[in-house]
């Protein structure tokens, strides 16, 4: 029996919206140009999963998960207040720091909902401490690989993936921050290719990967050019709000740069500024920097650009020197911000890493030792994001960040000009 | 025949009791008996911390690590256990005789440090006592023969004949009174009495019963919440221990009122030692014809009660987690789309009530609405059971009239130079000794039962850390803010304790507390940062004293420590 539902009017941030009674708030808002983020929500699952909590809104002054709210006559919802925007962003940030998200080497990058929400919300400054949990990758299933480092425990796969005869394939095990998705290998092997493919698709992040196939057509990156909120164009992207600094001064400024545990890619990106570099040269002098080959600070600098995190005592020492000698320090690129690729060793004991590298490598023989000498840098127990060692004033995400992006930030910081990072330039990979 | 999933926990307990742990074969056998995937069963097992997947010793020792235990000798007792048994905490000794583990509050706060050995209670532990216990166990004495008898210390009840709960109980008397009333009349009386839930949420009990009575469906359930997991509380234990009959009659009353056929007592595994007593009473009640038989005087009403043992998870005190657990699943809280009175156990209308609520309801029928309603304040009628423990001369049970001032309470229990008082447990409210005029009632301090008293010399940060670690450990992990946010708060607290935090870190703690509270899915996450927030608000100076100046270097980063691994490695090499 199907009968058309009653029309009701709800009010979202003071704006009236007409919709069928009982319709999901997420859908109504979306259709009316208000974007409420969601990670675990499924249109057809009722009651909703309600696990990710990136959708918090306020109804009658009470915080509640937006995905749980159904349209009723007179419903009033608050969505876009600064407080709620910040709370939702915080929950997204928690997910990034709780797992190991190294976007530049992730198959899902560009199509990942978590990443897209990071862009949407302008997540550039790390708020929480990266935990680098020791998780493992499960290669045992027949069709899929479980890249647990990226799992956000949204429970979609648990509730949504079944064999033809209705047997579940995924289950939660453990509890609290130990919670992990376990695969029933027997049932997983009975999935068809299409079913396994769908499992990969419904995973909002890059945890469930197909062995037989890559994620999608190479180069197809859904959220690269268009924000996840783009379906609701009326929404102003909250991303990278313009920053204003104090009044511009037209004195020539001094800049220092360094590459710590990075690949020099960020420096290459700086060189990539093309003609802008010429402009910049008019405005700044470079002091200690690989560009100038000046190895020690000869003067106090206005701004220090740091590429790479800290993996050795030498990195720490250099970073501290930078902090002492620069007014403003900027973490440039993913490695400086969250350790990134070098931090791939963070979830193993140092011993294992060193043995793997020096004692068990293809070229090592029985005389091999772990190198150590007073002239050699000593290796830290893990790779530290720069802001965990010294205070960092600004962050430029990207691996590497685009030349234009770096140029704009530097220009802004030095001369207080306003800028907006266009969506396409704000990336984690 | 395939077993019903709701008996999964029982079955796992049977296997574990037989072997001391759950072996791979057990998992395979249980899975096929229930027609479940072994991966599913592992998911259930790993949710509950009393289920062991590795040998856990012929004698499995669970030492309580709650704050009261910590302040009364936990470290020495733990060291004594390690020394005497040869087991390191978290494992067994080499012979596999003893397994030593820590656990959250076990409901023996008035006699800490306390431990469970094969689920028998051992209280007021000292290194000497530990030595004696382990010697005896080694020489073959059974834990049950060595365990301490838990005698309840009722320290206070309203004078005269005003006590509601702590008074003589004559089994059967409530059922006699029940004959005079129709189910609707019972509900009307409970409503009139103003009784509200004693498990901490204070939902009006009469209304809850009415909703369930009116809910569609022939099959209905009464569930007694005897999970009592909030650290510091032991008032439900006392009721179960002293007058289990009162609870059974309360459940029959509730069942009769809503038209339920079955009652289930969800008993926390920490109270396994109370199980024989409960089962004995159930037997007697069945024999007397009060349970499992038609009662002609009650319109042939028939009701039965069984006990379901939990398996170690604080979250299972939350009513919807409890229902999931009863169904043999992981105790993950449901979304509040339906009240349990509409869709509860197995999707059927269900009343979930706390032990004390059901006992009070029975008393209301026995003593009459008026006796109950006259007590307390207009907004909070009747009496409330408090379990008081910590730095006071007279720990134990207090049946107070609602409306008592905090000052009176402190005096009564002989609080010694109180500095901090934790009302309603870690999820409740931290108050200072100055707040003597605060009132225990639904208008001010809605106390669920736990009262922990800390003298002024106690370190606030040890308390905060213990609470935060508790919530981090007990988070079910289903939602992001609680699962990922509580460890972040814990980390900042560590920073404060190590003297590396700045004023900025404290304001972060405030902001993050709000984020965890406002975005979490269930009551656990929504209340977990309460005490921390209040501590920052009420004792700013204590924080101030621990902070370092904000500077351009992160004090937390310790180069020497970060190099320790490498130095060790290369020295060995
Ligand atoms: C995290 C959490 C733990 C809880 N633990 C208990 C408990 O141990 N015992 C209890 O009776 N209620 C507990 N509750 C409250 C129950 O959800 C529920 O409100 C109560 O059992 C209802 O019974 P009442 O109305 O008789 O109080 C807890 C709630 C939360 C959110
Ligand atoms: S793209 Fe991959 S690494 Fe990046 S957020 Fe998504 S799942 Fe994590
Ligand atoms: S594997 Fe993917 S779908 Fe499953 S819980 Fe993790 S993030 Fe969600
Ligand atoms: S708040 Fe979330 S993670 Fe915490 S116990 Fe409740 S549902 Fe589980
Ligand atoms: S979308 Fe609402 S909780 Fe995940």
Image (spheres, coloured by chain):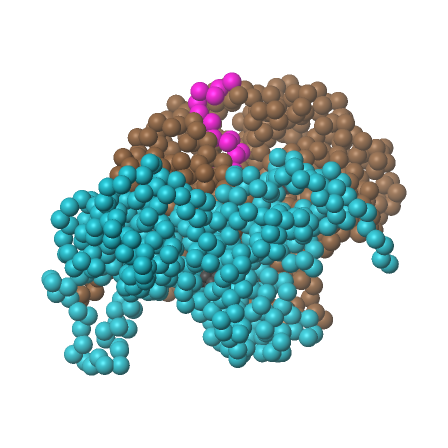
Chain colours: A cyan, B brown
Q: Is residue B20 left or right of residue A51?
A: left
> What secondary structure prevails in the magenta region?
loop
Q: In front here: A196 or A159?
A: A196
Q: Residue at x 84, y 35 (%)?
A: B184
Q: In front here: B195 or B281?
A: B195
Whole-percent x, y for residue A251 in the image: 24, 41
Whole-percent x, y for residue B324 in the image: 64, 54
| Residue B364 within the magenta-colored segment of the rendering | no
Q: In front here: A388 or B308?
A: A388
* Quarter the C terminus of chain A occupies: bottom left
Whole-percent x, y for residue B128 in the image: 34, 44
Is residue B556 at least partly visible in the picture? no
Q: From what the image shows, is residue A221 above or below residue A76?
A: below
How many numbered discs sit on the rendered protein? Answer: 0
Which quadrant of the frame does ligand 1 lie within?
A: top right
Q: Which residues are magenta?
A: B423-437
Q: From what the image shows, is residue B138 above or below residue A418?
A: below
Q: Quadrant of residue A149?
A: bottom left
Q: Residue at x 70, y 55 (%)?
A: A46
Q: Residue at x 44, y 67 (%)?
A: A106
Q: In front here: B43 or A279?
A: A279
Q: From what the image shows, is residue A94 above or below residue B359?
A: below
Whole-percent x, y for residue A13 in the image: 63, 39
* Quarter the N terminus of chain A occupies: bottom right
Q: Is residue B343 left or right of residue B430?
A: right
Is residue B219 at least partly visible in the picture? yes
Q: Residue at x 53, y 78 (%)?
A: A213
């Amino acid at each position: 029996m199907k009968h058309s539902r009653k029309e009701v009017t709800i009010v979202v941030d003071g704006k009236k919206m007409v919709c069928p009674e009982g319709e999901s708030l997420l859908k109504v808002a979306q259709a009316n140009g208000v974007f409420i983020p969601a990670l675990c929500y499924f249109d057809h699952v009722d009651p909703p999963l309600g696990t990710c909590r990136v959708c918090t809104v306020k109804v009658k002054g009470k915080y509640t998960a937006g995905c749980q709210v159904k349209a009723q006559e007179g419903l009033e919802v608050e969505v876009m207040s600064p407080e709620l925007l910040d709370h939702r962003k915080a929950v997204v940030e928690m997910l990034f720091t709780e797992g190991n998200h190294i976007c530049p080497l992730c198959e899902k990058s560009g199509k990942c909902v978590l990443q897209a929400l990071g862009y949407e919300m302008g997540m550039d400054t790390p708020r929480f401490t990266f935990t680098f949990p020791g998780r493992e990758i499960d290669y045992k299933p027949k069709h899929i690989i479980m890249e647990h480092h990226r799992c956000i425990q949204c429970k979609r796969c648990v509730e949504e993936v079944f064999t033809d005869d209705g047997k579940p394939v995924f289950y939660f095990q453990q509890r609290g921050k130990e919670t992990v998705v376990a695969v029933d290998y027997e049932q997983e092997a009975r999935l068809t290719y299409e079913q396994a493919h769908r499992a990969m698709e419904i995973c909002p992040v890059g945890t469930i990967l197909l062995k037989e196939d890559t994620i999608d057509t190479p180069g197809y990156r859904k959220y690269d050019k268009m924000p996840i909120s783009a379906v609701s164009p009326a929404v102003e992207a909250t991303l990278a709000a313009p920053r204003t600094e104090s009044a511009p001064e037209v004195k020539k400024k001094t800049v220092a740069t360094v590459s710590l545990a990075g690949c020099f890619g960020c420096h290459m990106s700086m060189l990539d500024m093309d003609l802008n570099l010429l402009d910049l040269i008019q405005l700044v002098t470079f002091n200690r920097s690989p560009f100038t080959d000046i190895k020690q600070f000869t003067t106090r600098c206005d701004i220090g650009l740091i590429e790479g995190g800290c993996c050795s005592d030498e990195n720490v020492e250099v970073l501290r020197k930078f902090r002492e000698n620069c007014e403003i320090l900027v973490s440039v690129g993913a490695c400086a911000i969250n350790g990134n690729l070098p931090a791939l060793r963070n979830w193993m004991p140092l011993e294992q890493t060193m043995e793997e590298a020096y004692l068990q490598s293809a070229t090592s023989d029985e005389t091999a030792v772990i190198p150590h000498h007073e002239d050699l840098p000593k290796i830290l127990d893990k790779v530290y994001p720069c802001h965990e060692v010294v205070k960092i004033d600004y962050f430029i995400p990207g691996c590497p960040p685009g030349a234009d992006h770096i140029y704009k930030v530097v220009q802004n910081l030095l001369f207080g000009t306003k800028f907006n990072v266009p969506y396409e330039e704000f990336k984690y990979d | 025949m395939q077993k019903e999933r709701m008996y999964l926990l029982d079955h796992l307990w049977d296997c574990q009791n037989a072997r001391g742990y759950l072996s791979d074969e057990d998992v395979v056998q249980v899975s096929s008996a229930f027609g479940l995937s072994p991966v599913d069963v592992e998911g259930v097992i790993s949710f509950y911390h009393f289920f062991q997947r590795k040998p856990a010793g012929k004698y499995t020792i669970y030492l309580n690590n709650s704050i009261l235990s910590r302040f009364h000798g936990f470290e020495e007792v733990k060291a004594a256990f390690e020394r005497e048994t040869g087991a390191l905490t978290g494992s067994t000794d080499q012979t596999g005789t003893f397994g030593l583990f820590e656990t959250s509050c076990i409901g023996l706060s008035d006699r800490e440090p306390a431990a469970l050995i094969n689920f028998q209670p051992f209280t007021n532990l000292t290194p000497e006592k530990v030595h004696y216990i382990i010697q005896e166990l080694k020489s073959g004495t059974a834990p049950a023969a060595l365990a301490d008898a838990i005698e309840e210390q009722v320290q206070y009840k309203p004078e005269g004949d005003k006590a509601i709960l702590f008074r003589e109980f004559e089994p059967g008397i409530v059922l006699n009174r029940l004959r005079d009333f129709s189910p609707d009349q019972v509900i009307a009386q409970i409503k009139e009495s103003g009784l509200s839930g004693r498990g901490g949420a204070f939902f009006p009990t009469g209304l809850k019963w009415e909703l369930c009575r009116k809910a569609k469906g022939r099959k209905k359930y009464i569930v007694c919440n005897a999970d009592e997991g909030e650290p510091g509380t032991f008032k439900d234990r006392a009721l179960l221990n002293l007058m289990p009959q009162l609870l059974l009659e309360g459940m029959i009353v509730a069942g009769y009122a809503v038209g339920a056929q079955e009652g289930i007592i969800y008993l926390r595994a920490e109270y396994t030692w109370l199980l024989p007593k409960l089962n004995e009473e159930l037997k007697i009640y069945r024999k007397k014809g009060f349970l499992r038989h038609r009662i002609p005087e009650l319109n042939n009403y028939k009701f039965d009660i069984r006990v379901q043992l939990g398996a170690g998870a604080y979250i299972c005190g939350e009513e919807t987690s409890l229902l999931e657990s009863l169904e043999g699943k992981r105790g993950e809280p449901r979304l509040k789309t339906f009240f349990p009175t509409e869709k509860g156990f197995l999707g059927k209308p269900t009343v979930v009530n706390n032990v004390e609520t059901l006992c009070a309801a029975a008393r209301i029928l026995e003593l009459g609405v008026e006796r109950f309603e006259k007590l307390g304040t207009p907004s909070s009628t009747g009496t409330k059971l408090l379990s008081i423990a910590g730095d006071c001369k007279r720990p134990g049970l207090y049946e107070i009239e609602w409306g008592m001032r905090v000052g009176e309470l402190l005096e009564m229990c002989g609080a010694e130079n109180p500095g901090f008082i934790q009302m309603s447990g870690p999820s409740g409210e931290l108050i200072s000794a100055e707040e003597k005029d605060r009132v225990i009632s639904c208008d001010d301090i809605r106390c669920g039962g736990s009262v922990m008293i800390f003298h002024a010399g106690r370190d606030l940060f040890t308390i905060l850390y213990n609470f935060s670690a508790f919530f981090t450990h007990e988070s079910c992990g289903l939602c992001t803010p609680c699962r990922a946010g509580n460890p972040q708060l814990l980390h900042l607290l560590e920073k404060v304790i190590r003297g590396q935090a700045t004023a900025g870190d404290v304001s972060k703690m405030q902001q993050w507390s709000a984020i965890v509270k406002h975005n979490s899915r269930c009551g656990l996450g929504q209340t977990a940062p309460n005490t921390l927030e209040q501590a920052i608000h009420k004792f700013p100076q204590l924080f101030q004293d621990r902070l370092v100046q904000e500077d351009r270097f992160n004090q937390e980063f310790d180069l020497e420590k970060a190099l320790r691994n490498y130095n060790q490695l290369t020295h060995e090499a």
